[in-house]
Image: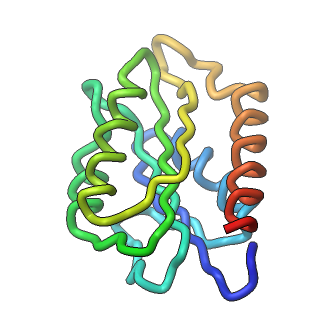
Amino acid sequence: MPKSKKAIVVYFSRDGNTRKVAKIIAEYLKCKCVFILEAENISIYDLIVIGSPVYTLEPVSTVTEWIKSHDFTNKKVVLLCTYTWFGEQRSIKIMKKLVQRQNGNVIGFHVTVAKHKFFKPDRPNSEDLNKVKDFAKNVLKMWKKS
């Protein structure tokens, strides 16, 4: 992590999928990883990673409302979605638009297939999680350069 810069990963997770991915990213960024409703004052952070599962083709309302209630001026933001079938690209677009309305700079995003007890009980698998690790490494490189 760049000196004097701070990052945080905030997420919402019902089934543990988004939490698992968020924790991997936080580990690589060497930063806090907190449930979105417990996120403190984000004004002290330079990089904010926001994670949401996809429900009914959208990010969960808890996440969208949280984004709407914060000012992201001079913040770099990375978006994260976990999904079972589809809706991940639409969810990223919704979140990106909301962050931009709050003056944030979205510098990247990642989507990961999530498990569902009926459809994909073995996801995210080791291949999915390795992709998350690679993404986290790239975010760290981008952030160091900024």
Name the residue: 33% across, 46% down. 95
Q: In the rendering, at what x and y percent does residue 60 appear? A: 28, 42
Name the residue: 53% across, 42% down. 109
In the rendered image, the residue lying farthest to the front is 146
| 92 in relation to 119, above or below | below
Q: How is the image coloured?
A: rainbow
- Name the one closer to the observer, 105 or 49: 105
In the rendered image, the residue lying farthest to the top is 119
Image quarter hosting the N terminus: bottom right
Q: In the rendering, at what x and y percent does residue 40 appear? A: 40, 80
| 56 in relation to 96, above or below | above
Name the residue: 49% across, 34% down. 82
- Name the one closer to the observer, 93 or 7: 93
Name the residue: 39% across, 72% down. 38
| 137 in relation to 145, above or below | above
Q: Is residue 53 left or right of residue 29?
A: left
Image quarter hosting the C terminus: bottom right
Picture quadrant where residue 124 is located: top right
